[in-house]
Image (cartoon, grey):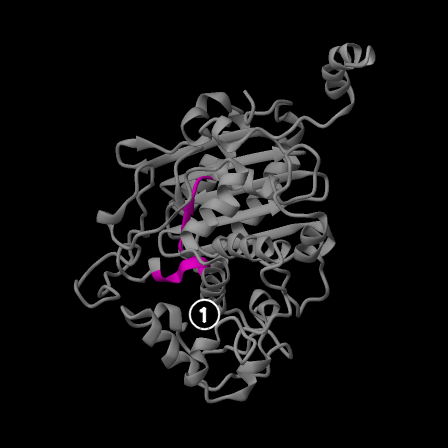
Amino acid sequence: MSARWPILLMILPLLLFCGGRKPAPAPAELPDWNHTIENSQSELPKMDAVVDSFMRFWALKGVSIAVTRHDSLIYARGYGKADPSTPMTPGTIMRLASVSKLLTAIGVMRLQEEGKLYLDTPVFGPYGILNEYDGSIRDDNYYLMTVEHLLRHQGGFHYRGADVMFTGYHPDQEEFLRSELRRPLAFTPGTWQQYSNFGYFLLSLVIEKVSGMPYEEFMQKEVFEPCGCRGFRIAGNYLKDRLPGESMYFMQPDSEPVTSFDGKYAGVEKCYGGNDITSLMGAGAWVGSAVELARVVSSINGLEGIEDILSADSIRKMTTWYDENTFSLGWVDTKDGEWTRTGSFSGTSAIVKVFPDGESWVLISNTSAWRGSKFSRNTSYLIKNLRRRFSASLPQRDLFSE
C-alpha cells in the first residue's frame, strides 16, 4: 500500500463532512413520522386560534397542517378530532381526493426517467401502451392520445352531467373500461382541455402495464418508499374499511342520506358509500398524512435539503406554466412559481401549496364543506393568511430529523 493511503483514509471522513453532500438515509433508517411527530411539538397559540376559528365557521371536525421551509419540517399539528374519541394529529391519515393525481404524475415521471415510457408515448394504437383495448375503440382520435395528454387533462374526455367515475357501479374494471372506450371523444386530444378523472384512471392502468406491478405496489416501491413514507394506502369506501390510523369522515349536519354506489344500502352518508373511491385509483383514491405528503413534496421540489426522487428536468416539466388553458403535469396551477394541488369530495378536502420562497404548506380536513369543491379556494386563502401573519414566527428547526 502506498504511504499516502493511511493519510487519505484519515482525512476522507473530514473531507466528506466539510464539502460533500450528506447521503439521504435509507428509508428503513428514517423515523416513522406518522407516529413520532406529536401535536405538542408545534404550538403557536395565535395561529392555532385562527385555525380554530376557521374550523368553527366551516363546521370542520378535524384539520391537519404541515409546513416545510427549504425541506425542513418546521410545523406540524392536528386540530380537532379524527373521530369522537381521538384527537387529530400530524400523522393521522386522510383521504387526499384529487391530490392523488399529483402522486400519480410523480409515478409517471419516475417511469419516464427509467426509460419505460415517454410523455409522447401513445396510449392506444399499434404502438400504444394499452393497445389490448383497441378492439373496443370506435373513434380513431383515441390513437392520437398520449401520456402527456392524460396528464394535462387533454385526452378528449368530456361528460355532460355527472362524472363517469362517480356514477354507477363498475365491479368489472375491464368491462367498464371497454364500454367507455366505445364512446366518441368530445374533442381531438391535445386541442383543448377538460378536467378528467377518467384520464387519471387510465394513467393508473398505464403505470400497471409499463411497470408490471399493481398500481398501489408500484407507487409504494417507486414513490413513497424512496421518500421514506410508510402511511400511504388506497382508500376504502365504507366505515368498516377504515384503515389503522385513518380519520373518520363527516358530512355537514343538513346533508341528505344517499343510496350506496353499489346499490347494497339505502340511506348511507355520502362520505361512506356514496362513491366508489377505491376504484378511482390514481385519480383520487390515496390516503396519507399531512406530514408524509409534505415529505413527498419536499422530494420533488428541486431544493437542496432533501434528495429529490425526480431529476431537475422532470421537476421543470411538471411545474412549467404555459397559459390559463394548459394544466401543469399533476399540479392544477404553477403560475408565477406558486404550485398548487387541490382535492375534495364528500368528507374530505386537501390542498398543497408550494411558494417561490421555499415554503410549502399542506392542509387536509376530514369534513365536507357546504361549498363543495369550491372550498379549496377558502383553504387557499387560509394558508396565505397564516403565512402572512405567522410565517416569521415559525421555528427554525427540522422535525423530519429531530
Residue 280 forms part of the magenta stretch: yes
- Please indicate whether residue 163 sits to the left or right of residue 252 in the image: right
Is 298 magenta? The answer is no
Q: Residue at x 42, y 85 (%)?
A: 135
Residue, x 32% and y 47% (percent of image)?
Answer: 249
Under circle 1, the secondary element is: helix
Q: Where is residue 379 in the image (x, y as percent from the top left)?
A: 52, 48
Taking depth in this image into account, of 402 and 314 the one nearest to the observer is 314
Does residue 105 sit above or below 131 in this rendering?
above
Q: Is residue 386 above or below residue 126?
A: above
Coordinates of residue 366 in the picture (x, y in percent): 38, 45
Image x and y of residue 98, in percent: 47, 57
Q: Is residue 240 visible?
A: yes
Residue 182 seen in this snapshot: no
The residue labelled by disc 1 is 198
Q: What stretch is highlighted in magenta?
A: 279-289
Three-letter residue code for mark 1: Phe
